[in-house]
Image: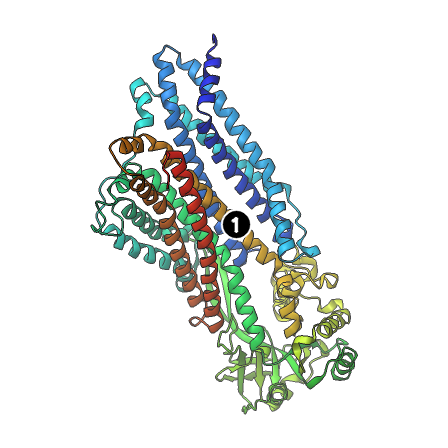
Amino acid sequence: MRQFSEVCALMRRKNKRQYALLAGCCFFSVLLITAYVCMMRAPTVLNVLPEGGDSRKQVMMIFALAVIGCAVFTTYGSGLFLRQKSREIGVFLALGASRAQVRREFYREMGVISLGSCAAGVILGGPLAWILWQFFRLAVVDTQEMRLVFDPNAYVFSLAFSVFVIAVMFLLGRRSVRRTDIIDIVQESHKSEPIRDVPRWYGPAGIGLLALGGFLGYMAPNFFVLVLHWYPPEGLTAVFFLPALMGLYMILLHTVVNGWNGKKKLYRDLIATSQMRFQGRQTVRNMLVMTLLIAGAYFGSFYTPTIGTGAMIGYDQRPVDYVYNFRADQDIPLEEEVRALAEEYGVTVTDFAAAPMLRLAVDGEDHIEEEGPMGTTWRAEYREIMHSELFLSASGYEALTGERVDLASGEIRGVIDAEGSRLGFDPMKSLVTNYLTGEQLPVTSLEPLRYDSLFARYVLSDAAFARLGAGLPDEWRETQVCFNVEDCAATYDFAKALFNEIVDRSTIDVAQFDGWDPVIRDRRIAEDGFYFLDREHCAEAGFTVIDYAQRDSSAFRLDWQYMPQFRILDKMDFVKTMAVFLILFVFIAVVCFAAVFVIAYTRCMTIALTNARVYDDLRRLGASNGCLRRSVRGQVKRVFLVPALAGTGLIYAFYTMILYFNGSGITPSEAAGLLACLLVIAAVSGLMYAVYRLTLAQVCRALGIHR
């Protein structure tokens, strides 16, 4: 070999595992980020997730965790490669090679690896997302709405991440080549990154900081908005999660250095604990990334069981099988036509009730936003006419529910759900107004009624109902219908036919988004010149345009203001209605858990490569095969077990806290959802244990340790 490049090529062949590890880290990270962002930015998903909604915020939060995790993982892989490469660089320099030669060849290698692996990740990320999505469509539900359409702009994110990966590799490589002490360069691969002694109080203190940070991080936005009347800049509230991150880091440090067994197993685990300490910094960094990714993966995993369990319990708890309402100017089927249609499908209607409703204006506090030197603040301004609500008469409520309500002329009662959850509905009002005639009635709000099927309605006395309804046209009047059937579980075809009949006979005038309000509309047009929920402006504002031709889509069924509540239809079509949400969060969980498994496997195999000589020495000193295996198991177990316990416990406690503070405690349906989440944890833990056993077997095989 006469050329320096030939010598380098020979060295690459000899160290192909190290090059494969670096290329694999870069490829896998870019692949996951590309697949995630292709899915996240797909119109299929964005059309369902409302702008600024909680679901989209959750997706973005987990995406941020995935980016951080993959970035740290890639940086770790690059650093590990350069530690091994440093010896080769030092030998070349010691033999007389110029730094320019070494730098030129080194940059060529890094360029080929980084550009090749990142390009492969970007190219294959989209197909991976498409394949996974198609698999979920076949396994869960396959509808036209589920057709995944990519947005080419999504690749901007993956290209930006690829640039970051390449930049990190070249910056670390440049620093490695520029070092002047050849002996230091040669010995770099033998240096460890030990952790100093950590006091045992780090463990309990870390747990306390973790709990404190989670609580402060969750409550800080509410404190700023509700107490200080100030909208903080984007990202500021994330600062309050820092104690949780510090606490998590302290817990991991304590686990690596001291363990949680006290001094009981100090000497039995001496070798494994000492090896973990000597590589402590790398190990803790990997554990931290794994913990965050596990937390994000579980956060996505919990969405499906929580929503699904709560929905199924809610459907079963409904007091009425069939409920729908419509505007009085619409030609929608009433009792005679409903019974005729039911007879056609062999369904027996056991009771049928219909009651008139009024759309009246109510008072409330408006939030007026103001720009100032500290940013956006808001102040509350009372309005006698805030928005509109639907009102039943006491006799109408009794006809629908069979429950008698005695009200004086100036009294009202709101209707909340059976569990007492108000879900953003305020049953306490003090003034009711006929918006068209100006007739007003000061009222006293009594204890709310509880009836799931009439949630978010108000009940007036018959006299007040007649007085306030005088002069209202049909556009401001509605009809509420409730009826039951025999053997509801066998009436799906009838429910589907009635649903289609209602949609077919509804005019374009009522193709309105769920939050559309005529009172707010007038105020917005007066102040802004347009109303963002009108059909011509809906899409611009990021809201669903109601399309009767898409009546089976998630957007239509979740957002149409006059969507019927048919027990059997809602239960049977739940998966279809929520398909995009369910598959989206399952997809997120799969991506994050895949990253966790790859990082854990890579870290454990690194332990095998780094400690191979140590285990050879122990074997020569007389250590038995069982002793060596126990030492390896102690290290691999910590890499898997500690992040799994920390991430699972962290997110489960945080999820419970969210449900608790979202309403007045944990409702029975939410408790059932949390139990379902435990089943998810059990299933994923079983999968994680299988990966742990596979990894342990691979590490033992690499070290020549047999059972």
Residue 164 seen in render: no
How many numbered discs, if any?
A: 1
Q: Amino acid at mark 1?
A: Val
Residue 37 vertical position relative to residue 421 in the rendered view, above or below: above
Residue 679: % across, % down: 47, 62
Q: Residue at x 58, y 58 (%)?
A: 581
Residue 315: % across, % down: 58, 73
Residue 342 seen in render: yes
Q: Residues within 10 Å of mark 1 (few under 14, many from 20)?
A: some
Residue 602 vertical position relative to residue 651 in the rendered view, above or below: above
Q: Residue at x 21, y 51 (%)?
A: 264
Which residue occupies the foreground of this view, 104 or 450?
Answer: 104
Residue 547 vertical position relative to residue 619 in the rendered view, above or below: below
Residue 315 vertical position relative to residue 230 in the rendered view, above or below: below
Residue 534: % across, % down: 67, 62
Q: Secondary structure at mark 1?
A: helix
Report which residue position mark 1 lands on: 590
Q: Residue at x 40, y 36 (%)?
A: 701
Residue 358: % across, % down: 65, 80
* Side of 611 where 407 appears, left or right: right
Which residue occupies the foreground of this view, 180 or 193?
Answer: 193
Which residue occupies the foreground of this view, 193 or 60?
Answer: 193
Colour mapping: rainbow
Q: Residue at x 49, y 31 (%)?
A: 23
* Side of 102 where 434 appears, left or right: right
